[in-house]
Amino acid sequence: MAIIRVEKNENYVVLDRGLLNDARLSWKAKGILAYMLSMPDDWVFYVEELMKHGADGEKSFRSGFNELKKFGYLERFPVYENHQIVKWETIVYEVPQNLLAQNVQEGNSNPPSINQKKEALLNTDFKLNTELLNTDIKDIV
């Protein structure tokens, strides 16, 4: 199957591929995280506002959002004033934090791959067929 791509000169996002390959996450959670990471670094997230930017209902959105918290991509902290919660701070991570913390505690400086399946790496040792790239041919069908 071919992948057709557009020219990317503006309005695109660069993401760590690890989150997309994290087999623990549903597609819903990956989509929510990708959307959140596409926002500027100083963006303030409101759960109710995030829900408005997708077709899923509240229950569906919250299940994806909770997945992200469970696997260390999101942290939420209450902000108190006069012993009452006035708002919630949300921190979004491109790399799961519980995985990093676990490796620091174990003294492992090389975190394991998030994708836990043993998949072969792509072969990048290939050569272009320059005959197909010949632009001097006048009768290209």
Image: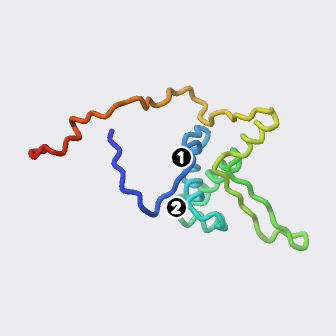
Give, as a three-letter code, the residue at label 2: Gly
Residue lying farthest right? 82
Regarding residue 141, the answer to whether it shows in the image is no
* Quadrant of the image containing the C terminus: top left
* Residue 112 rendering spot, x and y as whole percentages: 67, 33
* Residue 30 rendering spot, x and y as whole percentages: 56, 49
Q: Is residue 135 above or below residue 60?
A: above
Q: Quadrant of residue 101?
A: top right
Which residue lies at the image location 76% right of the left edge and 36% below the top edge? 103
Left or right placement of residue 59 versus residue 136 in this view:
right
Left or right placement of residue 76 versus residue 81 in this view:
left
Left or right placement of residue 83 versus residue 130 in this view:
right
**Circle 1 residue:** 27
Give, as a three-letter code, the residue at label 1: Trp
- CA gap, disc 2 to disc 1? 13 Å
**Circle 2 residue:** 54
- Assess disc 2: are there few (<14), some (14-19) or many (≥20) residues with their C-alpha within 10 Å of its C-alpha: few
